[in-house]
Image (cartoon, rainbow, N blue to C red):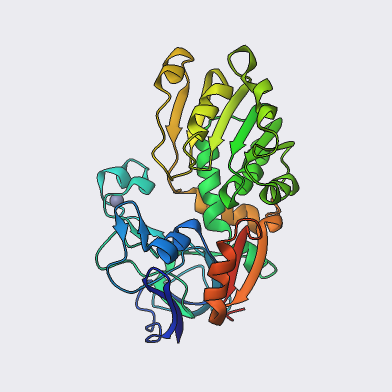
Amino acid sequence: MKAVVIHAPHDLRIEEIAPAPAPGPGEVRVAIARGGICGSDLHYYHEGGFGAVRIREPMALGHEVSGIVAGLGAGVRGLSVGDKVALNPSRPCGECEYCRRDMRNQCLDMRFNGSAMRMPHEQGLFRAEVTLPAGQAVRLSPETDLALAALCEPFAVCLHAVGQGGALLGRRVLISGSGPIGCLAVAAARLAGAAEIVVTDIAAPPLRIAAAMGATRCIDLSAEAAALEVEKTGKGRIDVVFECSGAAPALRTACEVVRPGGQVITVGLGSEPQFPLSLVVSKEIRLAGSFRFDHEFALAADLIDRGRVDLSPVLTGVFPMEDAIAAFDFASDKAKAMKVQLRFGGD
Ligand code: ZN
């Protein structure tokens, strides 16, 4: 069967690998239907990794996938062959200090599909079929669109971030960075009852998608840099900022627009920005990071499954998996692409 495997920067191959093994006890085999290309997949593709994480052996990419159950091992309950499922790529150990403290996203022995953090690497899910613990498969309704189901993982990231921001009901929110995470964060903030959602970016096309997701105001900082000045007046007017861009100046801007006692939640990873310590101290800003997700994956699946959110505006392209290289190149063009998915034929 075929898989999308990264060997080195710009050496992405669609190659034949051994079939997914027959599912053992407690395992499930899933025919992959759709797989979304994430920013981290693009970092592996262009740079061979990010930070200290580097590809040291061939690795199938992908951790945002949906599919159809193709086989069940002994003892698996609640799933049947033919069920649509979303696959949770994270497999915390369940035993370490942080798993026991209900902080599984901080697991000391995390296995995360499509990550080169461990050696051997945890293989990704851009494969025609995968066999994995049944606990990673979340059952969906027969009518759920498998393209939307493949958004569970990035949407879970946004639900976790919104959870870090506390109650958003009636709040004024700013989301900096209108990539897939920023746009999905708009949906999460809306769901949480935010009264106003301002989104900033440095390009117009992604902001049009943020608007379609329900942003109340979109500001293209490359064209109207002064438009955010009003939010800095009176020590800042925004209750909660979600920093999703990872851009160097964005953390300072976030601290300038947030009101005293307000919150800045950092989701984006990129450059190491200069830390605006004096603003954080003098305005008593509550600053928190947000990393991956935990129980929010099941919540994301449920919200998508029941049609409580429409995430379809972020889907801007689908390519057959055989054209994965074209898909990765297209996904790298931020002017054209938001969330690009591969189709694996499992639907
Ligand atoms: Zn653990």
Viewer-closest of 268 and 302: 268
| Position in image of residue 120 (x %, y %) | 25, 68
What is the quadrant of residue 200 in the picture? top right
In this rendering, position of residue 138 left or right of residue 18:
right
| Position in image of residue 192 (x %, y %) | 64, 37
Viewer-closest of 31 and 327: 327
* Image quadrant where one finds the N terminus: bottom left
| Position in image of residue 224 (x %, y %) | 70, 34
| Position in image of residue 313 (x %, y %) | 71, 56
Q: Is residue 322 above or below residue 277?
A: below
Residue displayed at 49% across by 15% down: 283
* Image quadrant where one finds the C terminus: bottom right
Residue displayed at 49% across by 57% down: 39
Q: Is residue 333 above or below residue 282?
A: below
Task: State whether residue 7 appears in this view.
Answer: yes
Task: State whether residue 169 appears in this view.
Answer: no
Q: Is residue 203 above or below residue 277?
A: below
In this rendering, position of residue 133 left or right of residue 303:
left
Residue displayed at 58% across by 42% down: 177
* Numbered circles on residues, count: 0
Residue found at the very far front of the displayed protein: 223
